[in-house]
Amino acid sequence: MPLITQPNLHEPGKRYFQAYTPGDDFYEALIETHQGLTDEQSEVVNARLILLLANHIGDIGVLREALQIARAGV
């Protein structure tokens, strides 16, 4: 399975009228998750989130590709 790099966020059963709206919903949830946390706590949350999502994806090839793309932007 190739890495999906185009916008692909959605919520089952919810209709969106703008293509960016699901991304906005996720960003809002992400910001809310970090509210009230210290920088160190936020780093732990981010690390746990990465590992949870990596486990959900499961495909090492896709994860390697994502890591390469993420590092290329730094």
Image (cartoon, rainbow, N blue to C red):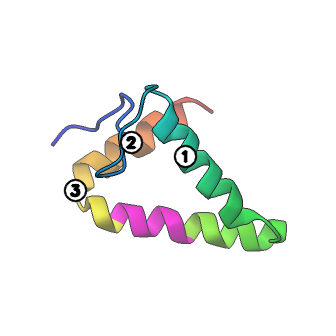
Q: Can you identify the residue that label 1 sits on?
A: 25
Residue 21: x percent and y percent? 51, 34
Q: Given contact means CB atoms under 8 Å apart, are the residues at marks 3 and 2 in contact?
A: no
Residue 19: x percent and y percent? 43, 26
Secondary structure at numbered mark 2:
loop
Secondary structure at numbered mark 3:
loop
CA gap, disc 3 to disc 2? Answer: 19 Å
Residue 2's place in the image compared with 11, above or below, is above
Nearer the observer: mark 1 or 3; the answer is 1
Q: Can you identify the residue that label 2 sits on?
A: 9
Nearer the observer: mark 3 or 2; the answer is 2
Viewer-closest of 24 and 5:
24
Q: Given contact means CB atoms under 8 Å apart, are the residues at marks 1 and 2 in contact?
A: yes
Residue 19's place in the image compared with 30, above or below, is above
Sequence-earlier tag: 1 or 2: 2
Q: Residue at x 25, y 56 (%)?
A: 60
Point out which mark residue 59 bears: 3
Q: Residue at x 36, y 28 (%)?
A: 6
Magenta residues (range)? 48-54
**For mark 2, does the 10 Å Cα neighbourhood hold few (<14), some (14 to 19), or many (20 or more) residues?**
some
**For mark 3, does the 10 Å Cα neighbourhood hold few (<14), some (14 to 19), or many (20 or more) residues?**
few
Sequence-earlier tag: 3 or 2: 2
| Magenta-colored segment: predominant secondary structure | helix
Quarter of the image with the N terminus is: top left
